[in-house]
Image (spheres, rainbow, N blue to C red):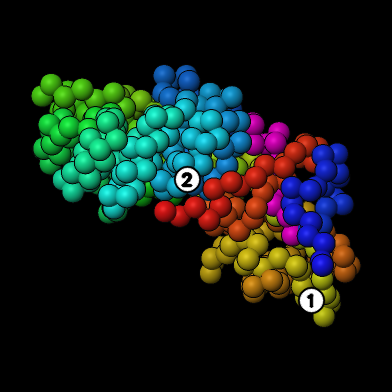
Amino acid sequence: MPIVRPTHDIRPGTPVAELDTPVLLLDLDRFERNARRMWDVMAANGVGWRPHSKAHKSPEIARMQMAIGAHGVTCAKVSEAEIMVAGGVPSVLIAYEPPLPVKWERIAALQAHAEVIACVDAPEHVAMASAAGVQAGVEVPVLVELEIGMDRCGIRPGEPALALAQRVMDAPGVRLAGVMGYEGHCLTVWPMEEKIAAVKGALGQVVETAELLRSRGIPVGIVSVGGSGSYLQAAHVPGVTELQAGGGCFVDRFYAEECHLAELGFEFAATVLASVSGRPTPERAILDSGFKTMSERDTVKPLPIGLEDAEVVYLSAEHMNLRLGPGARQLAIGERVEFLLEYSDTTFFRHDAFVAHRGGVVERIIPIAGRGRLT
């Protein structure tokens, strides 16, 4: 039988330069500096931190963020919340509207182990949450999600949200925990003055709706907003109680360049290490990392570190085609090359674990326990 060597068999103390490839790396020093940079802004403004885990899907990463200041995590799916609760996270927000009764039943069952909040933006969600809560003998906490410009989920702010919140208040087996809005359409706005205005305008709708509910006697404890690309602006909006920014702990080309986090001092903490498998011409190198290893867009590719005048032409399933210009170093077969990621969310889930290191030496393996959890 063949010998299988999973990622978790890599031993602490191994130099990163000696690792088999391809491998997903996490620089712990950079991760911690990025996380503290975000948390310091939130703490200074009296805002809580509930970082999104949809990219890393790892309870261990969540616990690392909680050690820095987070009070819980945000998830995209019920199955991710189940992994987080099993991993010891005490408060989880599922930042979408579960569409089926079975999902609400799973959320209700989780209340015995942790606070698990979900979102509603229609009466149908309230009815399913209520039925699940009554059946389980618990109150399912929910946030009313508002549509504030992204044209995705959410009910309109103001009176429509008030009517839905009142429906939650009147339903058994469900509890209104607050409101939520996501200013995702503002992440790439630039220059800074325009982003500040865009974020303030979008999140102002969330805060004003929370105030409207309170004026009608409806308690609103949580006002949850914020992505990594706009965390700095969102943290300064009065009335916001928590931010969901999480991807900024890792940083990729989207966050660094398109959301301008590099200009705020954020560092690339997550990378992929690949090896040169072929040199068919002086102008071309083939590496062992394709789109099963990392993602690309038509106009944005993974970026080689420390390799001048070189660019990724395309990724096939298992291979990378790397163009080497006249100023590029002539890579040898077997040589390792590290890459900055195009986007972390579409790269991490392709791997079983992060190989976490400090100073180029492996410290531990961090499993991506929620990989493949899509329900």
> With 21 as the anchor, is 66 left or right in this view?
left
The N terminus sits in image quarter? bottom right
Residue 286, placed above or below residue 269 = below
Q: Position of residue 176 (x, y in %)?
A: 23, 30
Q: Is residue 306 above or below residue 251?
A: below
Q: Position of residue 226 (x, y in %)?
A: 40, 37
Q: Mark 2 points at which residue?
A: 80
Q: Which amino acid does label 1 sit on?
A: Glu
Q: Is residue 217 above or below residue 224?
A: above
What residue span does the magenta drawing correspond to? Answer: 22-33
Find the residue positioned furthest to the bottom: 280
Q: Quadrant of residue 261?
A: top right
232 left or right of 267? left
Which secondary structure, mark 1?
loop
Task: Please identify the quarter of the rendering in which residue 349 is found.
Answer: bottom right
Q: Can residue 230 be seen in this view?
A: no
| Residue closer to the observer: 366 or 101 | 101
Residue 283's tag is 1
Task: Say which of marks 2 and 1 sits in front.
Answer: 2
Residue 288 falls within the magenta-colored stretch = no
Whether residue 3 is visible here, answered yes or no, is yes
How many numbered circles does the render carry? 2
